[in-house]
Every structure is written in C-alpha cells, then in structure tokens.
Amino acid sequence: NCKSCSLGKYSITEASNSNYSCILCDKGMFNNLEGSSECQICSDGYISTKLRDTCQACKPGKYSAGINKEDHINCINCPIGKYSETFGANSVSLCISCPEGKWSDFNGLNNSENCNSCKSGYYSNIEASTTEANCKECPSGRYNPYQGAKKLTDCLFAELGRFSLAGLNMSLECEKGKYSSKPGSTDCNLCESGKYSDQYGTIYCKNCPPLSESNSDFTDWVCSENTFEIRNNTYRNCI
C-alpha cells in the first residue's frame, strides 16, 4: 500500500511507498496536511517549527514579515528604543516606541515597563530614545522627585525658603544666615546688614533689635560697640 507523507513533509513523487522518500519542509515553511506534495511559507508574524507541521507565532518583542521562506525562519527583535506586547506581530510597525520619559538600549523588549525610566531630577520629551543621554537635567531652580518625567514642566520650582541645583530630585533648605523669597531660586541670599536668620529654610531675615547688629555669618545678632546684652529666660536686649 502507498503511504502518505506525514505532517511537516512532502513528496516529490506521485506514488510513494516509503516514508523515506518524504522530504522535510524547508525552514520557514510548513505542511499541515498528510500526503501533500508541497509546503507553504509561514504567514507574516509566524515562523516554522522544528517538525514543520505548523507555524508558531512570534513572541512579544519580536516580529516576522516577508514573502520569502527565509523571512520566516527566525523572528526579528524589535529595534532598540521600541517594544511590542503583541503575539504574532507581522510588521516592525507593531513595535511601539518607548514613551517620553523612558529609553532603552536593548532590542526585543516585550513590555513598556522594560523601557528604562529617566532618573529623578531628569526628564525626556523624546520618544523611542535609545540612550540615557537623552534624559535632560532639570535646570537650576527646579527639581523632580519622580522617575520618568516627560517634559520640563514636570520639573518643579524650588519653594520659598529653598533652592535647587541642576539635576536634583529635591529642593534644598536655605542655611541659617540666608533666605529665599521667590520660587525657583538657584541659590539663597545672604541676609543684609542689620538682619539675621537663625533658622533653616527662611523666606526673609529678621531685623536686629535696637543697639545691635548682625554677627559675622548673619545667623544671630550681637550688641553693638559700647553696649552690652541683658537677658533672662525669654528676653534678650542691648542697653
């Protein structure tokens, strides 16, 4: 009795009486019918299996496309800066750009979460970024406590009594003897003569009391020359 070629194989003769005359389908092709005399190229988004009896879908992060059998031997990784969550992706166009605020220098990503986020203190308005160098520092006077910031406006202005330098993830308190009276300060101002600040993060400096002046670092007041200080538990003054 004639025997049919098994799945994944084809025969170049009309009447085969032995499985040994059956030929395995080429890579990139398949045959899912017994006794077939030809194999078919896998559809876009699929590649051939080892047994050539079916085609398997490309996993997320990969795709296949083309009219030739060679196009369906291996799935192709999505390019760097992109990802795909789709099974059986049949075009590179199904590889989605890593969103703004993220980047990737690896190919074949299967999820947007696999794109790296810009560090806190930085932001990026570039899609499909392939390098961390595209993450820009928040400028001086601003800061960003979150990862994955997308735009400059995600960088917050330093609050009153505080300041910020470029690329910081938090604003910093003004030291004693200094103040900041406007948002977005890049540094704190030294108290003027005749004033002082004895606390961190102050918005303005206090006036020295009568007959006194600022000390050398403006963190307190001292009695002026030819006067002396009197104090009790709640009171200080110069006479």
Image (spheres, rainbow, N blue to C red):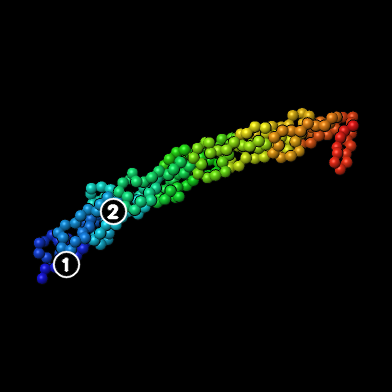
Q: Is residue 9 visible?
A: no
With 103 as the anchor, is 20 left or right in this view?
left
Residue 63: horizontal and vertical position, in percent? 32, 50
Looking at the rendered image, the quarter that the N terminus falls into is: bottom left
With 199 as the anchor, is 22 left or right in this view?
left
In the picture, residue 194 is in which quadrant? Answer: top right
Number of labels in the image equals 2
Rendered residue at 32%/50% (across/down): 89
Q: Of helix, strand and loop, which one carries label 2?
A: strand
In the picture, residue 29 is in which quadrant? Answer: bottom left
Q: Tell me how far mark 1 sits from mark 2, CA to CA.
A: 27 Å
Residue 211: horizontal and vertical position, in percent? 85, 29
Which marked residue is nearer to the observer: mark 1 or mark 2?
Answer: 2
Rendered residue at 65%/35% (across/down): 160
Rendered residue at 23%/49% (across/down): 68
Residue 85 vs residue 75, the one in the foreground: 85
Looking at the rendered image, the quarter that the C terminus falls into is: top right
With 229 as the anchor, is 189 left or right in this view?
left
Q: Amino acid at mark 1?
A: Asn
Mark 2: few/some/many CA within 10 Å (<14, 14-19, 20+): many
In the picture, residue 222 is in which quadrant? Answer: top right
Residue 108: horizontal and vertical position, in percent? 38, 50
Residue 45: horizontal and vertical position, in percent? 29, 51
User: Which residue is disc 1 drawn over?
Assistant: 19
User: Which residue is disc 2 drawn over?
Assistant: 46
Q: Of helix, strand and loop, which one carries label 1?
A: helix
